[in-house]
C-alpha cells in the first residue's frame, strides 16, 4: 500500500474525554471549532493561514462576538478535520488509501487551495492520488470503496470516476505485463493464494490468468461494481467469457445460498437490485459469456425476488441459445402462485420454443450460404437438437409424477420437439408411462391422445417388450407394438435369408454362364414356377425360426396381449380363407403353436399381414 507523510513536528492533538481535542501549547487557544459531536480547541493563526473557509467563518464569528465555529455536514467527520488541522500546524500526517479521500474532501470543504498558500493540502493530495494511488491496483479499489461514504463530495471531485477508469484500464492490460499484486483464490491447489510483487517475470507471466482481476473487483458494492464493469466492457478489449466469469463470481459472493434468505422481506429489495444489475451486465453477444447452468440459476433467483419482466425475458432468450448445455436439475424451476404445478413448465416450454426457433433460423441461413463452415454448423446444430430432445424427455419423466400437471401441458411440451430431433422414443415412452401411472383417472380418449405421441417404430426391442406387457396402455397401442415387433422380426430374418440366397445365386451363375445362352428359353419358361418354389422355401425357413421366437416371445406376454394377438390371428385367418385355399393350412394361433404343428408358413405370413386393418 502506498502512503505519503506530511509535516515534521511530532506534536499531536490531545484528548480530554471523548468529545474534546486540543493542542499542547504555551499559548492559550482562541477559537473553538465544532465538528459533529467533537470540539476542537485551536489557534486561529495556523488554521486561517491555510483555510479560506475558516477565514470567512472566524470573521463572521468576530462580528457576533463569538469564539465558536460550527462546521455542519463536514465530509469525513472529526477524523478528516484533524488531518487538515495537523497539516496547518505542521504536525506529521500520514496519508494512505483508507484516509486520502476523506482528507481530500475535507480540504476542499475548508478551501485549502493554492489561492491561499502555495503547496497547500489540496495540491499535495492530488499529487499523491495521481502519482501513487491511481497507479496501484489494490489502492484504487480501496479508494473507490471509501469514496462511497463520501458522496457527493467524492463524485464532484472526480475521485470516483478516476478510480473506475484506473481499474478498468488495468483489467485490459496483457496478463504477461502485470507486475502488481492481486488476489486469486479460484481453481488453485493452494487455499487463499496471494500473488505478490517480486515474482520473477517468466513465472509471473505463466501464472497470470486472463480473469486475474475478478475477485478483487467483487469486493465492491453493487452500484460501484456496475460502473466498473460498464467501463471494462466499454474498453472493448475484454473477452465475453471473462465478463461472464466475473459476473458469476460476483453472484456467488453476494447472493444468499437459501431461498428464505433470497426472498426475505429484509433483503428482497437489495437482492432484486443485485440480480437485475447482473442481468444488465451480461455480454451483449448472447452466444458467449455465461454457461447455461449459470443463466438458469439467475432465472431462478430472478423469479424468487420478482425481477423485472423484461429482465426475465432476456434470460429466456439467452437460455434458449444454450439449452443443449443444460441438465434436468437446472430446469427444475419452482412454480410461483397462481401456478398449481410443482415446477414452472410454461417457462421451460418458452425456452424450448425459443431454442428451436433459433435453430430453424440458423439452418435456413446455412442452406442459403452453402459454405463449408455452414455445413459444419448445420451438423453441430443437429447434434445439439438431439441433446435438447433427450433433455426434454428426461425433464418430462421428472415432472410426470406431478398430480397437478395437466395433459395439455405435457403434450405441448412433448410436441415442441421436432420429429428429426427424437429418433428414439424410449425416454418419451418412460415419461408417458409415469404420467399414466400417476393419473389413473384419465379417460380413454385422453390416454389415446397422450399415447399418440409415441411412434412404436422408434421403440427399441426392450422397450417394445415392456410396452406389450403394460396394462396402462390402450389396447390399440399394444396391438401396434405387437404388430411392428412381428414385422421387424420377419424383416430381419428375410434380410439374412436374402443375403445367403444372393451369395448362392452369384456362385451358380459364375459356374453356368456358358450354358445360359443355350437354356435361355427353358429358364424363361420355368421362371414363374422357380419364383413360387423359392418363396415357399424361404417361408418355411422363416416359419421354423419365427415359430421358436414367437412361442418364446408370446410366452412372455401377459394374458391380455396373447388374447389380443389370438383374435388378430383368427381375423387374419378368416380373410385368408376367402382369398385362397392355401390359407386353410393352419387353424392355430401363434400363441398356441408348437414345433412341428405349423403346416403352412405361407398361410401364416398372409394372416399376419392382415392382422391390422
Image (tube, rainbow, N blue to C red):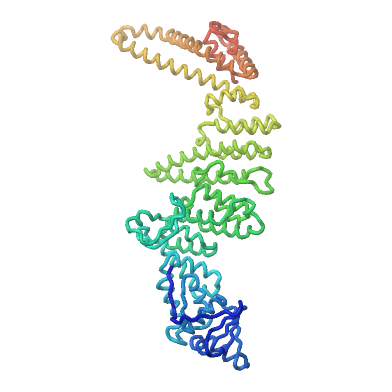
The residue closer to the viewer here, 527 or 365, is 365
The residue closer to the viewer here, 227 or 476, is 227
The residue closer to the viewer here, 209 or 301, is 209
Side of 72 where 52 appears, left or right:
left
Name the residue furthest left.
514
Toward which corner of the image does residue 553 lie, by quadrant?
top right
Toward which corner of the image does residue 552 lie, by quadrant?
top right
* Position of 514 relative to 10 (above/below): above
* Position of 421 relative to 229 (above/below): above
Write the residue at 43% across / 41% down: 380
Write the residue at 42% across / 63% down: 235
* Position of 484 relative to 16 (above/below): above
**Residue 604 x %, y %:** 55, 12
**Residue 401 x %, y %:** 64, 36
The residue closer to the viewer here, 150 or 283, is 150
Q: Quadrant of the C terminus?
A: top right
**Residue 515 x %, y %:** 30, 7
Q: Quadrant of the N terminus?
A: bottom left
Q: How many marks?
A: 0
**Residue 218 x %, y %:** 50, 59
Side of 516 where 116 appears, left or right:
right
Amino acid at each position: 500500500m502506498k502512503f505519503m507523510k506530511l509535516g515534521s513536528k511530532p506534536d499531536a492533538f490531545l484528548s480530554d474525554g471523548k468529545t474534546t481535542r486540543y493542542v499542547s501549547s504555551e499559548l492559550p487557544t482562541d477559537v473553538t471549532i465544532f465538528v459533529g459531536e467533537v470540539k476542537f480547541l485551536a489557534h486561529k493563526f495556523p488554521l486561517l493561514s491555510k483555510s479560506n473557509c475558516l477565514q470567512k467563518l472566524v470573521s463572521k464569528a468576530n462580528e457576533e462576538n463569538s469564539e465558536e465555529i460550527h462546521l455542519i455536514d463536514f465530509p469525513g467527520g472529526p477524523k478528516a478535520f484533524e488531518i487538515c488541522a495537523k497539516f496547518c500546524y505542521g504536525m506529521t500526517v500520514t496519508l494512505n488509501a483508507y484516509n486520502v479521500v476523506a482528507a481530500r474532501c475535507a480540504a476542499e470543504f475548508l478551501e485549502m487551495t493554492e489561492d491561499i498558500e502555495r503547496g497547500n493540502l489540496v495540491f499535495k493530495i492530488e499529487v499523491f492520488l495521481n502519482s501513487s494511488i491511481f497507479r496501484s491496483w489494490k489502492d484504487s479499489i480501496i479508494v473507490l470503496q471509501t469514496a462511497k461514504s463520501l458522496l457527493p463530495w467524492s463524485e464532484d471531485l472526480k475521485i470516483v470516476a478516476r478510480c473506475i477508469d484506473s481499474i478498468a484500464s488495468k483489467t485490459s492490460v496483457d496478463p504477461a505485463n502485470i507486475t502488481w499484486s492481486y488476489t486469486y483464490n479460484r481453481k488453485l491447489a493452494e487455499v487463499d493464494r496471494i500473488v505478490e510483487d517480486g515474482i520473477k517475470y517468466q513465472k509471473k507471466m505463466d501464472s497470470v490468468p486472463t480473469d486475474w482481476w475478478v475477485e478483487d473487483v467483487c469486493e465492491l458494492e453493487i452500484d460501484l461494481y456496475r460502473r466498473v464493469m460498464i467501463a471494462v466492457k466499454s474498453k472493448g478489449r475484454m473477452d465475453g467469457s471473462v465478463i461472464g466469469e466475473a459476473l458469476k463470481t460476483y453472484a456467488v459472493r453476494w447472493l444468499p445460498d437459501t431461498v428464505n434468505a433470497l426472498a426475505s422481506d429484509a433483503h428482497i429489495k437489495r437482492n432484486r437490485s443485485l440480480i437485475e444489475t447482473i442481468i444488465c451486465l451480461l455480454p451483449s453477444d448472447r452466444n458467449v459469456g455465461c454457461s447455461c447452468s449459470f443463466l438458469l440459476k439467475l432465472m431462478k433467483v430472478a423469479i424468487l425476488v420478482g425481477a423485472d419482466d423484461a429482465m426475465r425475458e432476456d434470460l429466456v432468450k439467452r437460455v434458449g441459445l444454450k439449452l443443449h448445455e443444460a441438465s434436468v436439475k437446472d430446469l427444475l424451476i419452482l412454480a410461483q402462485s397462481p401456478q398449481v404445478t410443482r415446477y414452472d413448465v410454461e417457462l421451460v416450454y418458452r425456452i424450448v420454443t425459443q431454442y428451436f426457433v433459433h435453430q430453424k433460423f440458423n439452418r435456413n441461413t446455412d442452406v442459403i450460404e452453402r459454405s463449408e463452415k455452414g455445413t459444419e454448423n448445420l451438423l453441430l446444430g443437429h447434434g445439439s437438437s438431439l441433446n435438447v430432445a433427450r433433455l426434454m424427455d428426461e425433464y418430462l419423466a421428472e415432472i410426470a409424477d406431478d398430480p397437478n400437471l395437466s395433459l395439455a401441458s405435457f403434450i405441448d411440451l412433448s410436441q415442441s420437439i421436432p420429429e428429426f430431433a427424437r429418433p428414439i422414443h424410449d425416454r418419451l415412452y418412460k415419461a408417458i408411462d409415469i404420467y399414466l401411472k400417476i393419473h389413473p383417472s384419465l379417460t380413454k380418449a385422453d390416454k389415446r391422445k397422450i399415447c399418440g405421441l409415441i411412434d412404436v417404430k422408434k421403440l427399441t426391442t426392450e422397450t417394445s417388450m415392456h410396452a406389450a406387457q403394460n396394462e396402462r396402455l390402450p389396447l390399440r397401442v399394444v396391438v401396434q407394438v405387437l404388430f411392428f415387433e412381428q414385422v421387424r422380426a420377419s424383416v430381419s430374418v428375410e434380410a439374412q435369408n436374402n443375403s445367403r440366397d444372393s451369395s448362392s445365386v452369384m456362385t451358380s451363375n459364375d459356374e453356368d454362364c456358358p450354358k445360359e445362352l443355350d437354356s435361355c428359353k427353358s429358364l424363361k419358361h420355368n421362371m414363374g414356377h422357380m419364383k413360387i418354389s423359392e418363396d415357399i422355401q424361404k417361408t418355411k425357413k422363416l416359419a421354423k425360426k419365427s415359430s421358436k421366437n414367437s412361442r418364446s416371445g408370446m410366452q412372455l406376454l401377459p394374458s391380455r396381449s396373447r388374447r389380443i394377438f389370438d383374435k388378430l390371428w383368427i381375423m387374419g385367418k378368416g380373410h385368408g380363407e376367402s382369398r385362397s385355399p392355401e390359407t386353410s393350412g393352419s387353424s392355430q394361433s401363434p400363441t398356441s403353436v408348437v414345433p412341428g404343428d405349423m403346416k403352412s408358413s405361407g398361410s401364416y405370413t398372409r394372416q399376419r399381414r392382415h392382422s391390422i386393418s
